[in-house]
Image: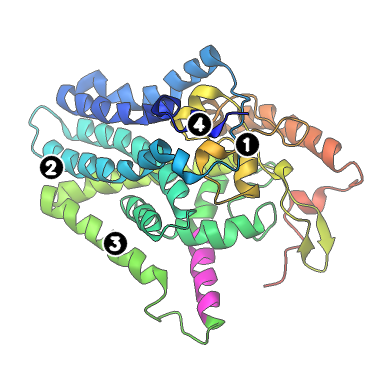
Amino acid sequence: MIAPEKLSRWQSALPFWISYLLVPLVWLAALKGGWWLLAVPLATWWTFAILDQATGPNLENADPDTGEEALGWYILLTRLWVPVQFITLYGLIWYATRADHLSTGERIALFFGVGVITGTIGINYSHELMHQKDRFERWLGDILLAMVLYSHFRSEHLLVHHRYVGTPRDPVTARYNEGFHRFYPRVLVQCLRSAFRAEREMLARRDRRWSDPSNPFWRYWTLQSVMILLAGLLGGWAGVGLFLVQAGVAVWQLELVNYVEHYGLTRKYLGEGKYEHVKPRHSWNSAQKASNWLLINLQRHSDHHYKPDRRFPLLQNHTEADAPQLPYGYPVMTVAALIPPLWRRVMNPRVRAWRRQYYPEIADWKPYNKALNPAPR
């Protein structure tokens, strides 16, 4: 158990600040062009896969009762990223649209790399911020999501995913045998609908219409419009196009992770539209040290669903006795997800083993495979 006094030291938080190294790297790619444009995708996907093998797993847990006064460096990490990403994104839009040494293809490749950063780091940090009680932090999370045009993720994640994970009512829970290329277009549509419906139903319970000013979708749409407008002011139509490229890549990165996190894992159906409570067994986990530095312990996903507002340095590692484990960290598993035959070969046996371990009493999994028995709407 890591003691609170050790967590309070800046040295303990330093490895998690590794994400900030991607900022000078993407600027170097913009200045150099050419093969340098591969630097960011290679760093986030392949470098951290190699580092995972070199550093091994991290099985240590911090004291979950540690007070926030000991977490200053960790909290600053996620808060500071917001202005850093904003300056990087819009600074690169201004620069790239005026850089004569970059061809159109190179500009698109550059902003593919920017999208890897705004998706892998930016959306992940927004996820941490949106779960906090501090209103300022939730606003920072909204700003990050607006930069990738995915503001409704906050409503969908907090009101739908955490409540219905592992059931047919959660669009983000990937079904058994559902390939990512079928999963992705499905969630793009269903998540937007479910998020809007969740907010509309909350307003209806207070006898208000969806058009009420308190609907957060008005804030979402306003922030997103400002972000697009700013891209246009700095880079014209080319700037808007590059902004849309990075936003598309960022959302794709997010949904790749969502696909991996709960693939094939379902909560037991109890009848009459009811499911068992969420347990650690309903999320895939990875203890890989380096990728958890990059992703601020996102791979300790079971504990996140157990304590959603628990800050990332306090998330607990769950062993195989309590939660299913991925064979590799997210950098490797998200690449595997892009190749459905490989993914099924690696993960389907693990899903079947998970079923035997936790639900030996269920003989017929066909209803779960086909996502039947949905809770009534």
Judge whether residue 118 can be spotted in this image.
Answer: yes
Residue annotated with mark 3: 223
Q: How many marks overall?
A: 4
Q: Give the residue type that dot 2 points to.
A: Trp
Q: Give the residue type that dot 1 points to.
A: Gln
Residue contact between numbered discs 3 and 1, judged by CB atoms under 8 Å: no
Numbered circle sitting on residue 5:
4
Residue annotated with mark 2: 94
Residue contact between numbered discs 3 and 4, judged by CB atoms under 8 Å: no
Image depth: mark 2 or mark 1 in front: 1
Q: Give the residue type that dot 4 points to.
A: Glu
Image depth: mark 3 or mark 1 in front: 1
Looking at the image, the residue that sits furthest to the top is 54
Q: Position of residue 307 (x, y in %)?
A: 62, 49
Magenta stretch: give its range: 190-203
SS at mark 1 in the image: loop
